[in-house]
Image: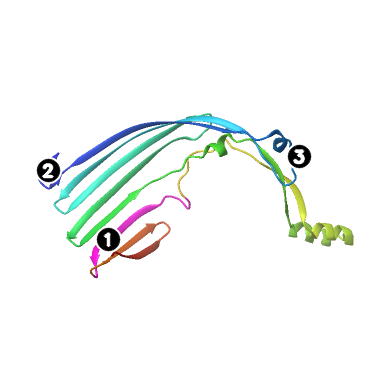
Amino acid sequence: MELPSGTAAFATFAEINCTEYEDVRDQGTLDGIYVGKGGTSGGGERTQYGVGGEVMVPVVEDLEVTLAGRFDDYNDDSKTGSAFTPKASFAYRPADVLPVRGGIGKSFRAPDMQRLFGGTTKGFNNSSDPTYCEATKSSGGTPAEIAEACGTQYFDTEVGANKELEVSGPTPGRIARLLMLLIERWNLNKILICSLNWPECWLVPSVIRSY
């Protein structure tokens, strides 16, 4: 579409992904006959549907604004659910050698199939327990009891899947990119890129030399 400030553009898409997960271990591993090795079997199916769209509008001659959105739905035997991820960005070129780009958006991650449909893995681990150690000393335990309490503790473990998992955002929360400054021709043959991210609040400058 032609506008007084330039050409506007848009795009849409739709997708379907079908995934099958199967993990089969040998019977000996499942029975726990091997020392120091655990294993499990599991399986599941998932169908993921995704639709989205994007539109770019030249607001003025040197400024373009892009709006985009995507919706994903996960259909499986879990509570993964769905998520909507919007994004807004701009590109401004005050001079031929100085393009400025920035954007803000949301992202997510769906649980992988192993964490949803895997079985339970039994094993063992070891650790120390300072609280147990001090409690045994305070209660007047015998030297043998104190040695046992303050030594290495061995315990059984069980690790398994969880169908209650849902989609989640990136840690430590929503990451929004506020500013990306790109100087394409700096000192003849260098490129300077600066990226400011929030809420982490860290600035990453880098210089790339081209030959």
Q: Amino acid at mark 2?
A: Leu
Q: Quadrant of the C terminus?
A: bottom left
SS state under label 1: strand
Badge number at residue 182: 1
**Which residue, given by chain and number where applicable, does mark 2 sit on?**
3
Point 34% across, 60% down: residue: 195
The first of marks 1 and 2 along the sequence is 2
Q: Is residue 2 magenta?
A: no
Q: Main secondary structure of the magenta part?
A: strand
Q: From mark 2 to mark 3, how far is it between C-alphas?
A: 72 Å
Q: Is 136 left or right of 16, judged from the image as shown?
A: right
Residue at 83% x, 62% y: name it.
137
Along the line of sight, the residue nearer the viewer: 121 or 103 = 121
Q: CA distance from mark 1 to mark 2?
A: 27 Å
User: How busy is the neighbourhood of tag 3: few (under 14 within 10 Å), some, or many (20 plus)?
Assistant: few
**Badge nearest the viewer, 2 or 3:** 3
Mark 2 or mark 3: name the one nearer the start of the chain: 2
Under circle 2, the secondary element is strand
Q: Amino acid at mark 1?
A: Leu
Instruction: Identify residue type, mark 3.
Output: Ile
Q: Which mark is residue 33?
A: 3
Point out the residue furthest to the bottom here: 187
Residue that protrudes farthest toward the left in the picture: 4
Mark 3 or mark 1, earlier in chain: 3
Q: Position of residue 161 (x, y in %)?
A: 60, 38
Please provide percent x and percent y for residue 175.
40, 52
In the image, residue 182 lies in the stretch drawn in magenta:
yes
Q: Nearer the viewer, residue 87 or 192?
A: 192
Q: Is residue 209 above or below residue 62?
A: below
Q: Which residues are magenta?
A: 171-187
Viewer can see residue 57: yes
